[in-house]
Amino acid sequence: MTRLRTLLATIRLPAISVLVALFVGAIVIMLSDLEVLGKIPQDPIGAIVLGAQRVYLAYTSLLMGAFGDPAKFGKALASGGDPVLWAKAFRPITETLLASVPLMFVGLAVMVSFRTGVFNIGGEGQFMMGALGGTIAAVVLGGAGVPAPLAILGVVVAGAALGAAWAFIPGILKARVGASEVITTIMLNYIANLFIFFLLVNWDVIQREDHTQPISKALDKFVVIPKILPIETLRLHLGFVVALLLAAAVSWFLWRTTKGFELRAAGLNLPAARYAGMGAASSVVIAMLISGAIAGMGGAFEVVGTVKQLTTAISGGVGFTAIAIALVGGTRPSGVVATALVFGALRNGGALMGLNTGIPIDLLFFIQALVIMFIAAPSLTQRLIRAPFRRRVKEATA
């Protein structure tokens, strides 16, 4: 019972923030519709009804794009097992889960560093370097005919190693000379992007055969990440399972081990941790190494399992979105996983929403920004929720 209350208390603010953000988004949808605005002077009630219909269409399209159309599930059930119909029914939800995989990895990476009091803004660069490591390992190991299980393991290890090495640079700089990890990690994001561009243009080992664009070779010719479901058209792969297992492992490490306690203690109160004999410098370096390894692992799974080609756009801004995910998730692994799933649903469902309603996908980024704002300002969120009830109490007592 106590654990349930703790869980409810943990998810209360994020859940309220998401609901308030969706409500504000609904108002924006209504006020940005020219037909609704043109109808307000003549028929305000009709304008409100029309606006509500547009909001309903937008959000139902968002949900169906993220989780699937109930009608398609009905057809699949009625077919008696037609794999094509089942693939069409399950494709939206599997794509949502797939979109959440890199968000989980980098969100966990950022969460670990935040828990230690290190503001790792370099998840983007570490993710990209992990993708580079995965690409090199796939081409080298796959080209050498290494058995598939060992090649997959090599891809993951190479991604984690290169991501950890990239995170080690700002970690050791902060530990040794006190350099700001915010500045160094941001700069390393740009360096990672340019370094990958240089290799894609000049290094024949990973460069695509025609040499016309900065794109790597097709990686599925060398290594294939196993899919979770037996239907060929569904792309959800092993990376999703690994991300969930990694979240459990991170939770165990931080809350069940001595070293995890030391890292969290350093994040809560660094002078007190030093007074207790805990190594502050080593905590920073260890946190950055773990953070970079997790982000790099996510990059390896993304480039080999999902995109199957390395480009400079491989990250898609996932590193900066992960910062929001870590904060919204309360810097806890379970919260990060849940928030990554929500953000993945917004990303995947936005395409159908835009197709059915003409609403630009930028609205979803606006909603994400609102969620972050309400999480960052809990007193504002609580006031927005309590204000109507306070008015009713005043009216009742008057």
Image: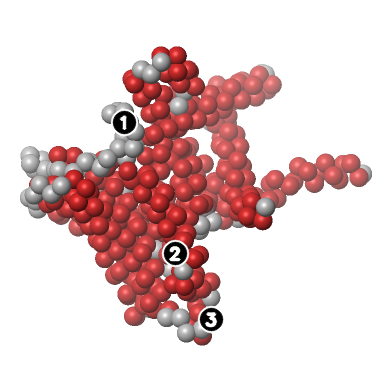
User: Residue 273, position in %: x, y?
Assistant: 50, 79
Residue located beneath label 1 in the image: 230
N-terminal of the two: label 3 or label 2? 2
N-terminal of the two: label 1 or label 3? 1
Bin the neighbour count of mark 2 within 10 Å (Cα to Cα): few under 14, some 14-19, many 20 and up: some
Task: Name the front one of labels 3 and 2.
Answer: 2
Quick check: can you spot residue 181?
no
Quick check: can you spot residue 396?
yes
Mark 1 lies on a secondary structure that is loop
Residue located beneath label 3 in the image: 272
For image coordinates 17% across by 53% down, the residue present is 137
N-terminal of the two: label 2 or label 1? 1
Circle 2/circle 1 CB separation < 8 Å: no
320 on left or right of 198: right
Task: Name the front one of labels 1 and 3.
Answer: 1
123 on left or right of 342: left
Instruction: Check the picture and name the quadrant holding the C terminus.
Output: top right
Circle 3: residue type: Ala
Bin the neighbour count of mark 1 within 10 Å (Cα to Cα): few under 14, some 14-19, many 20 and up: few
What is the number of the mark on residue 253? 2
Quarter of the image for residue 304 reads: top left
For image coordinates 21% across by 48% down, the residue present is 149
Circle 1: residue type: Pro
Circle 2: residue type: Phe
For image coordinates 43% across by 41% down, the residue present is 344
User: Residue 316, position in %: x, y?
Assistant: 33, 46
394 on left or right of 227: right
Mark 2 lies on a secondary structure that is helix
Mark 3 lies on a secondary structure that is helix
